[in-house]
């Protein structure tokens, strides 16, 4: 794939030919992805294989010892993208490669030799969701052909922080177009610019969204780290479905600057990694007060030490509430079995478990949230385009709707833009309907979490993140019938949510969500890290074409 090249799309799901199967088998021999592999390897495979198994601390140790360079690591990631994303199973997770990535890596190697590393992310390749601004030769499009060729004038605040930390910005990842806020019949991981991203565990299954490409890229180890964004579920669902760790932080902990928006009252970026420790390292680099972001007004001072918060693996004294009335409860007995096993692990680690936690009355929350999103999307997107402009003259939803209608064969081959149309009909943010919906959604979501924590003196709440990934269906769209939705309370409240692998159902990863009140990231990370170390349920992608029922 050439730098910045449009990723072509075929309407056919992945069908193995003999050539494709051979390429896939070759890639599997040397590229295990997140986690490990018990397969014995030939000596000439060892370098690549071992590199894929290293966490950030181990990669830094290799660079400090002179056994690895940022340039070599970046080349390795680019080779992996060529083998798995462009060829082999063709994951379609990457929209664009940074043409300057190798040059940046070489410069960072020189800096390390001369003055030492900047920190734990020095020389580490990082991928960004394609709705995050970068002031370089890459574009920022939210996956939409309507924004093709859009170059941001400056880095998003979080990107500048990653560059300061020494990260190598490797490229942009595919996503559900417009962060999955265009149509109610959309397919997660599909965009008109990037096509359909594939789940690396079972290729015809959904990668969930909207941060699909970021999650798939980390799971398949196309890069050690990636950044996603979430309005409601868009970090935690793809992280859970693809078997990685994702952090949806407290609103304002990571700056919202330079992110193509849905809704300012819920939007946030979040780290995505193979392990809780690596995600915490990334959070530490990204969580910096932005004086120009109003949501940073309650930034924690002093800023927590997120690595130290991981603790020693004990949960003694921690009180954990169990959320039982999430959407999808009882839809899949094997998910429930995994959840029960996870609760048992937490108890064994010393946690006191309150089961069930009293989450309270949330009637009206979903309707109020959707109203807020429609209003804020219209206003916030117009604001972004007013500041940034676009090469195609897009100034707001009316222009985007007209562009999609005029280019429907490319922009809307599978589903329409009815959410765009609903949002376009909304008035300004001074409308009473908006103000009442905003107040109601915040009150219900925050009372649900804080009320449960206060009533039983809890530190955090747990729930399944997702159900088994459904089969991709570009005609009918996503099928959430057997999925689990526990993301809404932390998303609407603006409170943090951490997901990590809990196990798998027929090879499809299932995540465990750990959430709490505002700025409770340290205690959530402690619980997530302890569970990860005790249960070690991370699953290596096997790039299976489909689940065969015998």
Image: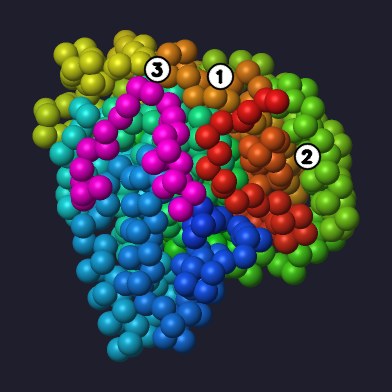
Where residue 88 appears, as percent x and y from the top left, is 41, 45
Rate crowding at label 3 as few (under 14), some (14 to 19) or many (20 or more) other CA atoms within 10 Å: some
Rate crowding at label 2 as few (under 14), some (14 to 19) or many (20 or more) other CA atoms within 10 Å: some
Left or right: 169, with 207 as reference point: left
Q: Nearer the viewer, residue 265 or 185?
A: 185
Rate crowding at label 1 as few (under 14), some (14 to 19) or many (20 or more) other CA atoms within 10 Å: some
Q: Is residue 489 visible?
A: no
As drawn, 515 above or below 204: below
Measure how far apart labels 1 and 2 are at the Cα level.
22 Å
Q: Earlier in the sequence, mark 3 or mark 2?
A: 3
Q: Is residue 528 visible?
A: yes
Residue holding disc 1: 479
The quadrant in which residue 262 appears is top left
Q: Earlier in the sequence, mark 1 or mark 2?
A: 2
Residue holding disc 2: 338
- Residue appearing at x 21%, y 57% in the figure: 99
Residue holding disc 3: 183
- SS under mark 2: helix
**Mark 1, mark 3: which one is toward the viewer?**
1
- SS under mark 1: loop
Q: Nearer the viewer, residue 7 or 148?
A: 7
Measure how far apart labels 3 and 2 are at the Cα level.
32 Å
- Dot 1 and dot 3 residues touching (CB under 8 Å): no
Q: Nearer the viewer, residue 29 or 403?
A: 29
Where residue 31 appears, as percent x and y from the top left, is 49, 57
Left or right: 124, with 480 as reference point: left
Magenta stretch, residue numbers: 1-26
Q: Residue furthest front?
A: 18
- Residue appearing at x 33%, y 45% in the figure: 86
**Mark 3, mark 2: which one is toward the viewer?**
2
Q: Earlier in the sequence, mark 1 or mark 3?
A: 3
């Amino acid at each position: 794939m050439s730098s910045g090249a449009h990723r072509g799309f075929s309407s056919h799901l992945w069908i193995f030919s003999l050539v494709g199967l051979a390429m896939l088998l070759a890639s599997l021999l040397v590229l295990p992805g997140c986690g490990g592999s018990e397969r014995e390897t030939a000596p000439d495979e060892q370098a690549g294989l071992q590199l894929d198994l290293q966490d950030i601390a181990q990669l830094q140790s290799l660079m400090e010892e002179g056994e690895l360079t940022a340039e070599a690591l970046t080349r390795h990631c680019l080779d992996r993208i060529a083998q798995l994303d462009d060829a082999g199973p063709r994951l379609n997770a990457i929209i664009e490669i940074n043409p300057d990535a190798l040059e940046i890596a070489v410069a960072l190697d020189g800096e390390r030799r001369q003055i030492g590393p900047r920190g734990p992310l020095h020389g580490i390749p990082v991928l960004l969701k394609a709705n995050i601004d970068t002031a370089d030769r890459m574009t920022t499009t939210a996956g939409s052909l309507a924004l093709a060729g859009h170059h941001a004038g400056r880095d998003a605040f979080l990107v500048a922080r990653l560059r300061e930390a020494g990260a190598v910005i490797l490229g942009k990842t595919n996503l559900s177009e417009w962060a999955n806020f265009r149509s109610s019949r959309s397919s997660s991981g599909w965009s008109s610019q990037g096509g359909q991203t594939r789940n690396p565990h079972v290729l015809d299954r959904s990668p969930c969204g909207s941060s699909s490409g970021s999650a798939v890229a980390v799971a398949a180890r196309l890069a050690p780290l990636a950044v996603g964004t979430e309005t409601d579920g868009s970090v935690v669902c793809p992280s859970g479905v693809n078997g990685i760790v994702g952090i949806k932080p407290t609103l304002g902990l990571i700056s919202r600057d330079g992110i193509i928006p849905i809704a300012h009252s819920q939007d946030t970026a979040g780290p995505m990694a193979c392990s809780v420790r690596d995600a915490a390292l990334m959070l530490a680099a990204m969580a910096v007060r932005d004086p120009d972001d109003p949501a940073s007004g309650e930034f924690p001072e002093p800023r927590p030490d997120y690595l130290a918060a991981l603790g020693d693996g004990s949960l003694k004294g921690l009180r954990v509430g169990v959320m039982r009335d999430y959407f999808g409860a009882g839809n899949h007995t094997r998910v429930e079995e995994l959840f029960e096993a996870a609760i048992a692990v937490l108890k064994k680690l010393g946690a006191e478990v309150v089961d069930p936690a009293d989450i309270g009355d949330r009637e009206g929350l979903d309707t109020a949230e959707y109203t807020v999103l429609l209003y804020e999307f219209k206003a916030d997107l117009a604001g972004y385009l007013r500041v940034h402009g676009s090469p195609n003259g897009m100034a707001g939803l009316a222009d985007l709707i007209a562009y999609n209608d005029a280019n429907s064969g490319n922009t809307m081959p599978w589903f329409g833009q009815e959410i765009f149309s609903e949002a376009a009909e909304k008035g300004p943010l001074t409308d009473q309907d908006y103000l009442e919906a905003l107040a109601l959604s915040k009150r219900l979501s925050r009372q649900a979490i804080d009320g449960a924590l206060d009533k039983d003196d809890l530190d955090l709440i747990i729930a399944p993140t997702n159900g088994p990934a459904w089969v991709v269906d570009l005609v009918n769209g996503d099928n959430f019938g057997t999925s689990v939705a526990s993301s809404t309370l932390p998303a609407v409240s603006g409170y943090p949510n951490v997901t990590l692998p809990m196990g798998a159902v027929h090879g499809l990863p299932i995540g465990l969500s750990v959430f709490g009140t505002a700025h409770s990231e340290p205690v959530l990370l402690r619980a997530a890290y302890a569970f990860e170390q005790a249960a070690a349920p991370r699953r290596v992608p096997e790039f299976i074409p489909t689940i065969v029922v015998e």
